[in-house]
Amino acid sequence: MTRATMILGRIAAGLLALSGMPAAATQISAPAACAALAHEAIPDGRILSSEAVAAGTFKAAPSPIAPDLGERIATMPAFCRVRAEAIPTPDSRIGVEIWLPLQNWNGRLLGTGNGGGAGRIAYEMGMVEGLKRGFAVANTDMGTAPDINAIIGHPERWIDFGHRATHEMTRIAKMTVRTFYKVTAFRSYFEGCSTGGQQALSAAQRYPNDYDGILAGDPGNNRTHVASYFLWNYAALNASPLAKLSVGQWSTVAQAVLANCVGKDGGAPGDRFLTDPRLCRFDPASLPLCKAGTTTDGCVTTAQLATLRRLYAGPVNPRTAERIYAGLTPGSEDQPLGPLLQGDPAIWPDQQFYPFRWSLGANFSAEKFDFDHDLDRVDAQLAGTLNANAADLSDFAARGGKLLLYTGLADPAVPFAEIVQHYDRVVASAGGPDTAAAFARLFLVPGMGHCIGGPGVTDIGQPFASDVPPAAVNDALMLLVAWTESGTAPDMVVARKPADDSNPAQERPICAYPALPEYRGGDATKRANFSCTAHARGTDQPPAPRYLN
């Protein structure tokens, strides 16, 4: 028996041991009790409605990011749907939705995160699968409905988006669970990715008593500087009509990166993704240069070469040369939410430049933005509200809280280097790797784009990646539960990739940092042919301290 098999066996056994919830937690609650919730009073808020929803009957508007949402909700069990509004300040209007299983509640609450600028309840980001796992689940629109760009001049609503809405959701959800089931939730968990990852880290840092376990994916926690990265890339891609690359050219760049680096970082020879992008030293100058006056998909122009260099370098202060944020990760060039979208003037500015509009006004100009003085103004007004960069998690750890972080190594929206550097700061604050690993662990997912998908083996049961995984070892959330409740700390999650017309189903271990899965020979679709092997800690140059505020 291998060490990995022994670890997975202990995790499975620990999860089985967790099935003994208090008797009150598993009793069936009648639909009449659900209807009565509509009349409950809550401080600084109100219940808008409550209704019992029969199994398989819930309907939701199509999701812009989860085209299979309709199929997933069709198999949901019966639940009590509660809609509420939190009003912590006169200017706040925070939408909250809570789903309470009518049968087989597992005794736990699961708060779930949102994405982008929020503004709606995100059913696809953990609510559906959380309900299927037996959790009472909650989500919030973060107080930005109907449009995040509409709250210019509303600083209380900026605070709601930054952190308060998630705390208010949690407060109301815990009250509602207690009223409905006549018992307090046995444990409370949170999961989210992207903006949801920011919510997750904000909860651990600002409200350490809200959750017992937190699952944070690809967190956009350094929010004002994530926005700076987006603006930097947008400016580079629109510097001139000749600066932008075509779809075919981005494919050429991505293929050149793989040709230069695959098989040199521990991955399998046939991988179409990088296992450790830190080992990839790709020079854009190695790309074929187009002849003067011509442009084809198989080459780049001198203007496009300058664009690539600027994207890979990342944003810097033009006066001091201080690094503001990481650059584009090699191996992420052709992924969704990558440079093709980040340079699109019809989409990207409206979706991602809201911090600049809040601080600088509705007429903010991306073309005239000064990454020195203008960014200082934005940070002075918003960094303390939006950013979740605190490395000291001692209050969360002291009460037994557990934090499980994961990030995609082919994520073009939140470069993984930022998450590694944040975790390393948590480690330093805790006093070293062993102390930190007792309450916080990071998992790097090779070949995963932003939160989901990508060319790698990337399904770990994260929000909107799949339906409920077939086994606990494939399920990052339930591994977090086992760690929190039985002390079984995860050293790996077994990721899955379903079969398609061209490839068989695959499994691969996703390892606790600083380890990564290294190929040992044999069938690369089998997890047994990979081992978790320690790689170097850290990444290239981190941001300057002033940009970690």
Image (cartoon, rainbow, N blue to C red):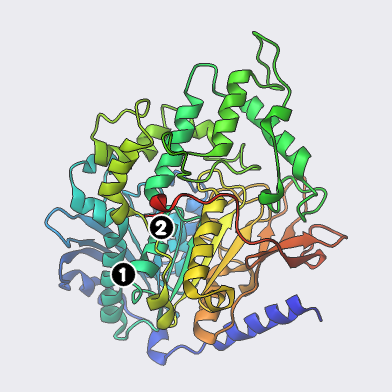
For this view, does 121 lie left or right of residue 521?
left
Question: What's under tag 1, amino acid-wise?
Answer: Thr
Element under label 1? Answer: helix
**Considering the image in quadrants, where does the C terminus appear?**
bottom left
Question: What's under tag 2, amino acid-wise?
Answer: Gln
Q: Which residue is mark 2?
A: 198
Q: Nearer the viewer, residue 203 or 536?
A: 536
Q: Position of residue 347 (x, y in %)?
A: 42, 32
Please name the residue shown 28% across and 55% down the image: 385
Image-quadrant location for residue 298: top right
Image-quadrant location for residue 412: top right
Identify the disc placed on residue 170: 1
Q: Position of residue 461 (x, y in %)?
A: 57, 63
Q: Nearer the viewer, residue 416 or 115?
A: 416
Residue neighbourhood size for the residue with mark 2, other residues' Cα within 10 Å, grouped as few (<14), some (14–19), many (≥20): many
Please name the residue shown 69% across and 53% down the image: 276
For this view, does 408 lie left or right of residue 543?
right
Viewer can see residue 485: yes
Viewer can see residue 354: no
Q: Position of residue 83 (x, y in %)?
A: 26, 62
